[in-house]
Amino acid sequence: MRVTPIAIGDPPLLNAAGLHAPYALRTIVELVSDDRITGIGEIPGGSVTLGMLRDARDVVIGHDPFQLNGIKQALVDRFGDGGVSALKDVRPWETARINHVWSAIEVACFDMMGKAIGRPVVDLLGGVVRERVPYSAYLFFKYEGAGGALGFDTDPAATGWAAARQAAALDPEGIVAQARAMCSEYGFESIKLKNGILDPDLEVDSMLALRKAFGPNVPLRIDPNGAWTHATALRCGRRLEGTLEYYEDPVRGQDGMAALKREMPGMPFATNMCTTSYGDIPGSIAKHSEDIILTDHHFWGGLRATLELNRVAATFGRGLSMHSNSHVGISMAAMTHLAAATPMLTYACDTHYPWQSDELLVGGKLPIEGGCARVTREPGLGITLDPVALARLHQQYEDCGLTDRDDAIEMQKREPGWQFKPVRY
Ligand code: GKR
Ligand code: MG
């Protein structure tokens, strides 16, 4: 079992927690069996998860990858609940560290199992319900810059999406230009805009500009990450009634979401913040805090645990979508296998994949065409790790000096004194 932290170039994207650093951190897990079958997994980076994964080697090595229940139990015996993120208030979805650790290992086990029996992971999850998995264009307000080695500089020779990816977008015109370039490159047919940063009315104006530019048939979502008060969210929501496919985390907490929903019964609400684990499901159902849950195998405890949400959604009349963070192709492949096997996951999934140019797969980045990623029929995840690329991205991790994501620190470099506020507007 090899555990490798990597850093991937990431542009200066804005969100309620601050600003993305020039590099996003991920941790890569490789499991190698006695008969030389390799399985790979990817998880958000960070010192706690990295330390736990390194410690998990003693627990994992020697197990049969098909014995997922036994491996999971051994990890729980070793780590308990794995500790809660110090950034719980900033990123409420990142609470149970054991889920991160287990997710990376479980995905690697599934990759090994698939390779051992010559079947894709999606078949081990019950089989294909959709071969082409739709993803949405995930737009961000941003400063100028491409991230990575270019930091906040830009490449003057860039064209098309590569140029738009590095351009500043701080107003409705910038967001529409970003959307046009991303949709024309990848063919996305639905759009999400990250909010909770600028003046809320400017953010709503940006959504309305997208509606005008793309017409009524392109589903639109807005996600202020709970940074709005009830009054702001109600006012902005009213301006967006009839425009949104769903309203993602306008306010914090299940009680806040439920109270807002009662005042906007016609608006579909979605979350990856107030209902983020099975422990939150009773409250979600009792309060009806959202209509759509954004799944995420990195945080819900792996592929099988996330797939089980399908039954919850079917039983209680909820919809499913998918959450994402800056990532490379192992996560992209795992997300696509999972979405291809989840009947209730009918909303286009989020992905940050277009924002990252670094990749560690043989053959480079996985294709997104017509807004969709096609699930492979190749064994396992259907991807191969390029050891040279992995070594380069690990060196990038060593060189960049980052060990944990902290968007507030990055923001303070731009705006000295800037402080994270759970509710800003
Ligand atoms: O990448 O800045 C970001 C997003 O804000 C991310 O951290 C969130 O987890 O994608 C996210 C979401 O809330 O949907
Ligand atoms: Mg969200």
Image (cartoon, helix red, strand yellow):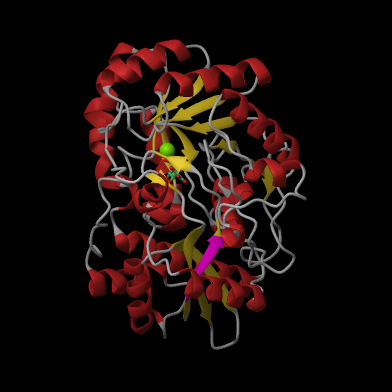
Q: Which residues are magenta?
A: 4-8
Answer with left or right where residue 78 lies relative to residue 51.
left
* Residue at the outermost bottom position: 34
Q: Which quarter of the rendered image does ligand 1 occupy? A: top left
Residue depicted at x 56% and y 45%: 351
Measured along the vertical axis of the image, is residue 243 above or below residue 425? above
Residue depicted at x 35% and y 28%: 290
Q: Quadrant of residue 329?
A: bottom right
Measured along the vertical axis of the image, is residue 415 above or below residue 49? above
Q: Where does the image place residue 140, in percent across and percent down from the top left?
A: 53, 37
Residue nearer the viewer, 162 or 52: 162
Instruction: Indicate the quadrant containing the C terminus: top left, top right, bottom left or bottom right.
Output: top left
Q: Quadrant of residue 67?
A: bottom left
Q: How many marks?
A: 0
Answer with left or right where residue 169 lies relative to residue 58.
right
- Residue 29 seen by the camera: no
Q: Where does the image place residue 34, in percent across and percent down from the top left?
A: 54, 88
* Magenta-span inclusion, residue 333: no
Answer with left or right where residue 75 lies relative to residue 317.
left
Residue depicted at x 64% and y 63%: 359
Q: Where does the image place residue 129, in percent across and percent down from the top left?
A: 61, 43
Residue nearer the viewer, 111 or 180: 180
- Residue 386 seen by the camera: yes
Q: Where does the image place residue 221, in percent across and percent down from the top left?
A: 51, 27
Q: Quadrant of residue 44?
A: bottom left
* Residue at the outermost front position: 416
Chief secondary structure of the magenta span? strand
Measured along the vertical axis of the image, is residue 38 above or below residue 333? below
